[in-house]
Amino acid sequence: MPAHAGAGRVLTGVYWATFALVAAMVAIPVVALVYGSFRTSAPGLPGEWTLRNYAGLASGGVLSSMLTTLVIGLFTSVISIVTGAAIALILHRTDFRYTRIVMPLIGLTFYFPSFILAMAWIIVGAPGGIYNTVVDDMLGMPWLRADIYTAIGIVFVMVLHQVPFVYLTMRGPIIGMDPIYEEAASAAGARPHHVLLRVTLPLLGYSLISSFILTFVMTIEQFAIPALLGIPGQVTVLATQLYLLVRFSPTDYGLAAAIGVALSLITGAAIWAQRRVTTAGRLTTVTGKAGRMRDLPLGRWRWAANLLCFGFVFLGLVMPMVILLYTSVLKWFTVNPLEGIYTLRNYAFIWESGSTMGSFTNTLIVSGAGAAIGVGLGLLCCYFTLRLRPAGHRTLDFLASLPFGVPGVVLGLGLLWAYAYLPVPLYGTLALMVIAFVTRFLPYATETIGGQMVQIDRSLEEAAWVNGATRLQGMSRILLPLVSLSLQGAYFLLFMAFFREISSAILIYSVNTSVISISIWSFFEQANWGLASALAVVATVIIFVAMALILRLAPTARRG
Amino acid sequence: MSIQVEALTKGYGPLTVVHGISFEVARGEFMSLLGPSGCGKSTTLRCIADLEDASSGVIRIDGQTVSAPAQNLVVPVHERQVGMVFQSYAIWPHMTVAANVGFPLAIRKVPARDVARQVDNALEIVGMRHLRQRHPAQLSGGQQQRVALARAIVGRPRVLLFDEPLSNLDAKLRESTRAEIKRLQRELDVATVYVTHDQEEALSMSDRVLVMDGGRIAQAGTPKQLYRRPANRFVADFVGRASFIDVTRRDGAGWTTAGGLALRLDDTDAPTAPRYQAMLRPETIAISAGGGAEAPDDGLNVLRGQVVESHYLGAYTEYMVDVAGARIKVHAAADFDVGAQVTLRVAPEFCRLVAIDDTAQAP
Ligand SMILES: Nc1ncnc2c1ncn2[C@@H]1O[C@H](COP(=O)(O)OP(=O)(O)OP(=O)(O)O)[C@@H](O)[C@H]1O
Ligand SMILES: [Mg+2]
């Protein structure tokens, strides 16, 4: 097409620029991490090549935290999948009366940051926390004492955090499932619980396994919850061990890098398995015309359904919020609200403190601008990998999806290694924070945008070309308007993710580039529960308000 | 009586989609529910199976009341002992053919040995026994359809229900499967309700057809009654092809068209209505070339006209003939040019008088 050669050259230029950028963003930290895992010294210092770090993986300490990681991950995933799927079935398959109340509340719980949830549960379940004071001092029943700083405590809080994810991934398959299979079973004489066990659940099998594996991945790369709960109780998982090796002396950056490589291999393998399952599951997909199945009567199990749904929302959202609000207005922490001295000084402090307000500004910059960059990059990746498919598009696709398998702390560590050597003054800047976040969440953007782009028939664009449009015009005039809803959805998703992100920031922030999540974290580490709670309340309110606003403005963002 | 439906009403919120219909299906009788899309056929069928809750009315199966909302009585679907075949077959994709067919027995705790034997029997009947270990994904549409059929009959159901079971098959397969379903139903001697929007299917398979329109019964009768003596214009139009000519009652006896032509019509048992039309089936009309000389009166209606359109359809040609301003469809194997003068002859018994007010009910 000679007439379009100019536009074609522009597009080729954009393609290679995108390719180079994505390759740099993904490859640099990964390569640096692998490099670091073979070095004897800390980043930037002279050292030698070694296999010592990998030998270190076989040491008792690392092996035991690997075992802890897997056991906690497995228990969390099993309990989450059962609870989340049960809630999804109750909400969308039975005559449960409060679906319209519980559904949005679970959506809110999904956006409730994990470290804030963990903080609230520490205030409740620490040895000197609310629960133990109540059962021990007030009720005089010391045998009821419980400690949140244990593996069981970690599993409990992680389940609260993961159930909304399971619910959201299972909701689509459950609603979209053709009810005809269940109707056929009823007509064949099966009672409702037999229909559930013999038809509904087996048909949801692939979705359940896929959701289970993803939950497992998210659990073993989870950093904030095991750090806040596990470090005081000396329950160490791989992610927290890596953090401890970097942040506290004696530091061992090389061993940390080797642990990062090992952790990435585990998550990578799990994600590979999940992809296999979803591809296999596509053969027997159960979505046909999504008719409306008559709701199953809960009957005498109604109380159990109510207890499960409202109990979950209470433990995962309402109670933590109330506890944080309560803690944030106390002058000194006390369990008995009647003894408390109430003050707004924590909120006043946030308003007056330059550094805290600075972290707000930083967060807004990183989230607002970073999400825009992420969406732009995601759109380009999707356009090239799904539409134009020039030479090398498969590599681009692979690179863009790779961060999915790299845990946040590991990515942070990789960047730490990389920017100690690279001759660009990025270390300690907001830009590095943006790079980290965009890299980490690029797969979320490409999934969201690509999901809609594959549904748009190629012929729509081809019709534009036939009618004289260049490829660029075809993209801007036809494709962009058609995918704009998914762009809004992706922006919303990234904004929310960046706003709450802590695991990839914890190793690379500096005093000037602190974001809200880091500030809350620091206050909490300094045992300043009041200030941490006040900041957490403000951040949560911002998240919920932003979510409400965006949902009102862009209904499709609900997909996220 | 095997199925009795009395004043069945079904509504979704303020919207009523089935308006108090009543009918009965005798043991061994094959009855079709025929009607255009959205007229409430499936809804009626699904109320019989209890896949929908009836709003009011009474449903009885084998004399047992299974649904009577007024008395708060509902026998749930899994206790109704119905066999049902769905439009999309609903073969469970995670079970083999044998497991699919055996499900209705296994779920009723029939011993495994008996299950295997009865499954083999049922699969034998539909000619699928050699595929018993296959998975549904490895079956063609027609084979899945047979599995669905075997599954519906294996539990010796009290009634058989079909919801457009053939509409996903190609034309050839549809015809052979029609005959097979019919044969099976005869052997089982069980009351059958068959939902379809294909009039050919309904006419060829049924003992009785119930034509539905907007949630009401437009007419119930044997296929021949429906085709030859439709109760109203809706049924006449929906069942088969036809031309309609406005007619008025002549002073004295007989009928006349707007163009002044006298017609001899079959008007026995015709309901009274504000307006009437004569219905002519295109294949009952003989067509010949030329204006034709005045022939002796042989009791036939003789109409002279001009061919204005012709559509070649292979087995026959459909001609549109203008007769004194009225358009009449004629099917004939002979060739005529557009513009040719032709003579049409049709016996009075094939010129049926139709009432135009659609409120008229079946005689
Ligand atoms: N769940 C529902 N809520 C509201 N209206 C419904 C519902 N299900 C069906 N309807 C309406 O009830 C009417 C009858 O539906 P039904 O499925 O019985 O039609 P049908 O005669 O089987 O049509 P088709 O030939 O297209 O299958 C339709 O107008 C439909 O829109
Ligand atoms: Mg239907």
Image (spheres, helix red, strand yellow):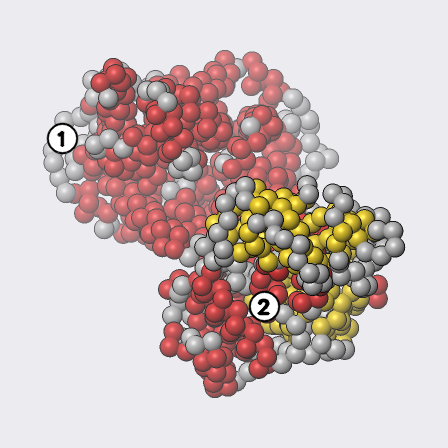
- Displayed quadrant of residue A373: top left
Q: In this view, does A392 lie above or below B156?
A: above
- On the image, the x and y values in percent for residue B271 come to 83, 58
Which residue is located at x 32 percent, y 22 percent?
A471
As helix, strand or loop, the secondary structure at mark 2 comes to helix
Q: What is the quadrant of the N terminus of chain A in the image? A: top left
Which residue is located at x 21 percent, y 21 percent?
A422
As helix, strand or loop, the secondary structure at mark 1 comes to loop
The crowd level at tag 1 (other Cα within 10 Å; few <14, some 14-19, many 20+) is few
Q: Nearer the viewer, residue A467 or A483?
A: A467
In this rendering, would B249 be left or right of B110? right
Any part of residue A414 in sight: no
Which residue is located at x 58 percent, y 37 percent?
A108
Q: Name the residue under label 1.
A: A47
Which residue is located at x 46 percent, y 20 percent?
A368
- On the image, the x and y values in percent for residue A310 come to 65, 48
Q: Name the residue under label 2.
A: B204
- On the image, the x and y values in percent for residue A147 come to 52, 49
In this rendering, would A67 be left or right of A392? right
Q: Which chain carries label 1?
A: A
- Displayed quadrant of residue A407: top left
Q: What residue type is labelled 1?
A: Gly
Any part of residue B88 in sight: yes
Q: In this view, does A463 lie above or below A139?
A: above
Q: What residue type is labelled 2?
A: Ser
The crowd level at tag 2 (other Cα within 10 Å; few <14, some 14-19, many 20+) is few
| Residue extending farthest right | B252
* Inter-mark Cα distance, 2 to 1: 90 Å
